[in-house]
Image (cartoon, grey):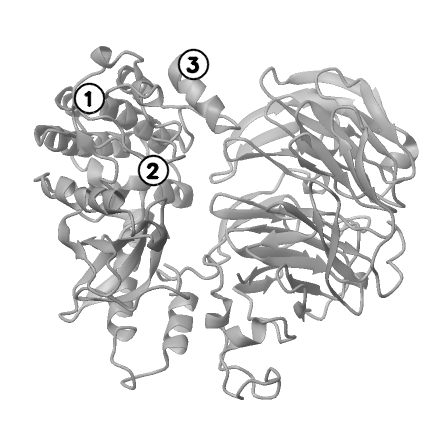
Amino acid sequence: MRPLGAGDPIRLGPYRVLGVLGEGGMGKVYFGRDDGGRTAAVKVLLPELAHDPHLAQRFLREAHTAQAVTSGGVARVLNARIDDHDGRPWIATEFLSGPTLDDAVRRHGPLGSDGVRALAASLAATLRDIHAAGLVHRDLKPANIVLTSEGPRVIDFGIARPEHGLTLTTTGQVPVTPGYGAPEQVLGQRVGPAADVFSLGAVLAYAATGRRAYDGTHVAAVQYEVVHGEPQLDTVPAELRPLIEPCLAKEPARRPTPDQIAGAFAPPPGADRVWRTGPLAEDIAQRGAEAARQATVIGRAPGSGPSRRRLLRTALAGGGLLAAGGAAGAWWLLREEPPREIPAPGLAHDAEPLDLLAGQYGTPPRELWGPLPVAAQAVDAVVTAPLSVLDVVIFAAAGGGLAARLTTDGKEKWRLPDVRAAAGLVELPGRRFVTAGPNGGLLCHDASTSKREWSVAGADTGRILAADESAVYLVTRGGRLRAVDTAARTVRWTVPLAQAAVRAPGPRATAAAGRLVVFGADGDVLAVDTATGATSWRIEGQAGSALQPLVVKDVVYLGGRTLAARSLGTGAEVWKVQGAPTVEPPQPGAGGWGTPALRGGSLYVMAGTALCEVAVATGLVVPRGSTPRGPLPHTAPVLQARTFWFAEPDGQGVSAHSTVAGKRYWTWSPGSRGPWGMSGAGNRVFLVNDGKLTAMPTID
């Protein structure tokens, strides 16, 4: 749950609004409490859509549709009406204090065979009740299944329709969730109950493995696989595979009925303990307790207790529904009362910290967790940047190997002591990552569980550079450039690299659209064909050291002595910015322009000490502010929400800058020295420095 922001209602009907649970294409969902203390999830139509009477009717139809289902397996509708204040319709359903199946698998791993059987039997019974009401849910997916102490509950009847109805969506929306909608849905044909059975099969495959049965790097690729390809069930337990496969039949008539599914999966006695005992049950209980506590303390009348900000700060620190750092704009809720000694000019001394963010300098927020002395020290002045995948942040661990800690509270989830973390780690599609073994072998692991999925013993890995959907690209221990095919698990090609390109701290690279762009340590840029390793184009002297290339569609953007946009395929110049609007000379080593990062249609990049916004299409430069000391240009910035984080020179800290006003918000320093590794995900920034790992919040 996120705190309320500008434009959010204070009350909807009988419900006082306490926080934001989520947002979709048509509506926003709030956590509400009525005067009797009963909580609810209250979904309201977005303001920009409320003027359309057709959409308003469709929105309220969701409530009437859900009310038609008499089943304990769905979330009950409590109320629905059009708000008297602004005319926006809203729907209140019972608040379910458990994680979604999607969240549960990410946090706790696959359910196991017995757990999947229990899940299948329960969901099949719920689908039978939905279909008995003459409806088809049409959007059954892990995010629409909440695991409670009483079992799975199906939510969101937003696109549910009578069996004979066609899919209705707003203009431009995908009518089905990629990878879970049946082939007939993808093709826009009329659908029946068998479409929900297909979705159930895809849900069960995910619950059993933590991976989607149909996956790809693009929505169109996933939908193509649903219609024409075969599901990826090789990691599904053998005893479950023959039960799940029939649900995923291309032809609706060949899929089993919900009753047949319930009978085939027939869970053994006690199989439902997966959500009644153990870590998942503890998660469910903690969410319920936090929801009850917050509904009590946050819902008090003004003046009856501690300040709202202090209560929210306590809830965040306790890991409750207001997940620390999980919401843009939430960082000030983690702080003590605003410091009186640095009021913003023209504002009262008791101004909220949010007001200080309007381009003014300030003190940094508190860490979400850390610094924890759990990370490895720099090797040859190189820090292995942390990698955030799913619910964990993965990093080079003190004492050797890799470790993963939960992004929410920093608690360790797993450890791989025998891998060579100094070789780097890169994310692969399907929520996996690759690293190197002690003898140079390439290893692929599941990010959530650390389970090894495959290895290539002859990779001779020195440093992993990049990966795409079909290969991992690395520098061998002998200094050659190599591609390892992830499907065949063999070396695809090996080509020489100049010795100057691989000297410490080494090259940086990006792979996309058939090209691997390598920015060498000597400042030269090389692009090779990912299929053959043949050189496509080369640029000499772009910078004084390696900078991370940025690829957007078919253009690569390069910092250095110039900021250059070049055709990814041919290297032809699209545009180039020669000079830089800088206040101080740029830091030595990489020329005037740092590593660019993308937000919307603009690049954000430091030119010496100036933060610049640069139009992607034209190269037009708009200065956005400056800093007394420019960041290290070869350390890639991290963008989360509307905040950029840059590493300060000499390892003295990291600074946060607004992409809107361009001003520096603050500089955070733990009093250590040395190089930094940074990454960001989920409105959190993960920092490695001087053997410590820290999670910081960001702001919107």
Q: Amino acid at mark 2?
A: Thr
Foreground pick, 125 / 447: 125
Q: Is residue 213 left or right of residue 95?
A: right
Mark-to-mark CA distance, 2 and 3: 28 Å
- Which of pointers 1 and 2 indicates the residue nearer the eye? 2
Q: Is residue 20 left or right of residue 265?
A: right
Mark-to-mark CA distance, 1 and 2: 21 Å
Numbered tag placed on residue 360 in the rendering: none
Residue at point 18% right, 20% down?
Answer: 264
Residue that badge 2 annotates: 170
Residue that badge 1 annotates: 192
Tell me if label 1 and label 2 are in contact, CB under 8 Å. no
Looking at the image, can residue 398 be seen?
no
Q: Amino acid at mark 3?
A: Gly
Foreground pick, 348 / 666: 348
- Which of pointers 1 and 3 indicates the residue nearer the eye? 1
Where 536 sits versus 500, above or below? above
